[in-house]
């Protein structure tokens, strides 16, 4: 697993480590890693045009030091100072010593620079920061010149704000970020994309959407909760590990871990020892929920699936290997149940949920089952401290646990502790929290799973893993990862570019997704 650490945890670790090393060591390590990744991103550095958007914090210093290294390797580097009087002094001096260009914006012009007029391209001149009668007296460089530099760059480095930043980008940063976006110039974020909340991944106005992010010492919540805004995240080891808490804020599952834990039959297994899962889903009105959930359970493991409900005929027609009956009392013994999708929220659905709760086996409860739990407190009491996974989307979560708010990890963890069950809060970044405080985030690489019936597929997969013996937190986490991979496979299965695919194709893609994660496991093969 990869650990994700909170902002306060990272800052405390950095402070503790800084006390053990010489001044500037952490920044130079971070900047060296950033420069290395930029070199890889560019392919070659000689003659490439690099623009640094530099704010007042340490991220701006990282960008300046990295820019100095790229300049020494032949790149044409320009630093655009968004807060000239507060730019990192040592980083700025290093860039100037390497004859990088400097362009100052804004009224804060305490930078003692000087040189040719804005827009001049002499490779190493300082072109701004004069203002208010200092230096050349030309004043801050015009915003149009900065926009032109950004639009003509090969890459823009976002060093605007760091993990202490909050809120949307402030002028003149939005105009420069927009210039890069409009020109199709990739932005590489230094530590995190500016304007995106580092602790929650939320945005409140103008922000950076990075082509990739280079972070230092530890992954932060933003990297998991706002993955589409970060692009691929590359972690630079600066030696922070020993100073971080033993238990991270949250964890990211890897394909290798999921592949290693996914149950597969051994030489002594049969259909019963691999786990028998019961599916109570769908109705005459919503037979699709039954077909999707039961079919996903059958594809998720090699055990056995029993279905109970009024959509039994439809389930048998689509999946003849599933043992389907009309009522839970006729379903036979199971090691787990998945219940809720399409059962309705009236008296019939309530009877189904209560019958499943009577079975005293691990449960996955979704959709209408969650709504029923929210309406009937006595049912919530029956699931407390049992091996149960709840899988709400945002609306269902609000019904049973209140508004999640911006910090979805904290919200899921709080709900898991209050309800005494594992809570899987769906979203582009799905959060899984256990009652003991463990939390993981699956940052989806795309949004193809955002389609009707997708949750029914996930419910069936979790039920199958519970029946196979995985504890609820692992069952929910592993199913979430494979579910997301299946959505990606389904969207691209007929060729690229990917196109939207219905949940039935996502379900059909489960075997391909499982092959991918099993191939990533130690000793795994496709």
Image (cartoon, rainbow, N blue to C red):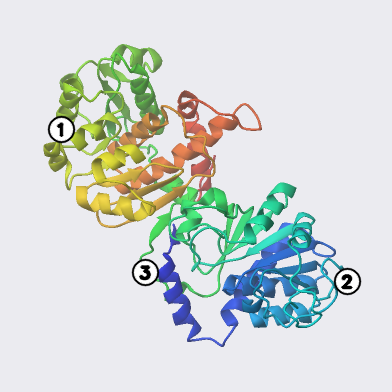
Q: How far separated are the C-alphas under marks 2 and 3?
A: 51 Å
- Outermost residue to the left: 378
Residue at 15%, 32% in the rendered image: 359
Q: Locate residue 418, reporting x and y percent.
A: 20, 51
Give the numbered dot on residue 261.
none
Horizontal side of 42 relative to 408 (left or right) equals right
In the image, residue 505 sits, relative to residue 236, either above or below, namely above
113 lies left or right of 408: right
Give the residue displayed 27% in from the left and 24% down from the top.
306
Residue 254 on image: x %, y %: 47, 51
Whichever of labels 2 and 3 marks the residue nearer the N terminus, that label is 2
Q: Of callouts 1 and 2, which one flags the residue occurring earlier in the amino acid sequence?
A: 2
Q: Residue at x 37, y 69 (%)?
A: 246
Secondary structure under tag 1 reads loop
Q: Pointer 2: what residue?
A: 122
For mark 2, give the secondary structure: loop
Badge 3, how many Cα within 10 Å: few under 14, some, many 20+?
A: few
Tell me: residue 179, above or below residue 58: above
Q: Are marks 1 and 2 in contact (CB under 8 Å)?
A: no
Q: Could you say which quadrant of the image residue 371 lies in?
A: top left
Q: Which residue is mark 3?
A: 246
What label sits on residue 359 in the rendered view?
1
């Amino acid at each position: 697993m990869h650990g994700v650490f909170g902002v306060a945890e990272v800052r405390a670790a950095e402070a503790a480590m800084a006390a053990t090393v010489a001044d500037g060591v952490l920044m130079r390590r971070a900047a060296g890693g950033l420069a290395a990744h930029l070199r890889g991103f560019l392919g070659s550095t000689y003659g490439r045009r690099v623009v640094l958007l530099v704010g007042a914090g340490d991220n701006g210093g990282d960008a300046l030091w990295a820019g100095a290294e790229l300049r020494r390797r032949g790149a044409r580097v320009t630093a655009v100072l968004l807060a000239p009087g507060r730019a990192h002094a040592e980083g700025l001096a290093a860039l100037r010593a390497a004859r990088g260009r400097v362009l100052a914006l804004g009224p804060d012009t305490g930078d003692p620079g000087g040189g040719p007029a804005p827009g001049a391209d002499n490779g190493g001149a300082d072109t701004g920061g004069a203002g208010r009668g200092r230096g050349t007296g030309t004043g801050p460089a015009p915003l149009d010149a900065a926009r032109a530099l950004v639009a003509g760059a090969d890459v823009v480095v976002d060093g605007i704000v760091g993990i202490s930043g909050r809120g949307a980008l402030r002028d003149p940063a939005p105009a420069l970020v927009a210039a890069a976006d409009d020109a199709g110039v990739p932005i590489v974020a230094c530590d995190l994309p500016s304007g995106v909340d580092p602790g929650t991944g939320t945005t409140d106005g103008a922000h950076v959407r990075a082509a990739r992010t280079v972070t230092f010492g530890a992954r932060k919540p933003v990297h998991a909760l706002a993955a589409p805004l970060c692009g691929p995240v590359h972690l630079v080891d600066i030696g922070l590990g020993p100073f971080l808490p033993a238990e991270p804020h949250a964890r990211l599952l890897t394909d290798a871990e999921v592949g290693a834990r996914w149950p597969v039959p051994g030489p002594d297994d049969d259909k019963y020892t691999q786990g028998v899962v019961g599916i109570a889903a769908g109705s005459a009105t919503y037979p699709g929920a039954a077909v999707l959930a039961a079919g996903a359970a059958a594809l998720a493991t090699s055990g056995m699936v029993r279905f109970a409900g009024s959509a039994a005929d439809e389930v048998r027609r689509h999946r003849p290997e599933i043992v389907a009956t009309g009522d839970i009392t006729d379903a036979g013994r199971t090691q787990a149940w998945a219940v809720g999708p399409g059962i309705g929220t009236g008296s019939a659905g309530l009877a189904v949920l209560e019958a499943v709760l009577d079975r005293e086996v691990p449960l996955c409860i979704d959709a209408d089952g969650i709504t029923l739990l929210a309406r009937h407190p006595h049912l919530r009491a029956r699931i407390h401290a049992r091996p149960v996974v709840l899988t709400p989307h945002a609306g269902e979560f609000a019904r049973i646990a209140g508004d999640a708010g911006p910090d979805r990890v904290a919200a899921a963890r709080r709900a898991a502790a209050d309800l005494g069950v594992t809570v899987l809060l769906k979203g582009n970044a799905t959060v899984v929290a256990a009652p003991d405080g463990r939390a993981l985030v699956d940052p989806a690489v795309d949004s193809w799973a955002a389609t009707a019936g997708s949750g029914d597929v996930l419910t069936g997969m979790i039920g199958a893993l519970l029946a196979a013996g995985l504890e609820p937190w692992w069952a929910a986490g592993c199913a979430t990862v494979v579910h997301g991979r299946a959505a990606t496979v389904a969207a691209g299965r007929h060729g690229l570019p990917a196109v939207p695919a219905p949940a039935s194709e996502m379900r059909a893609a489960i075997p391909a997704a499982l092959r991918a994660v099993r191939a990533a496991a130690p000793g795994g093969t496709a």
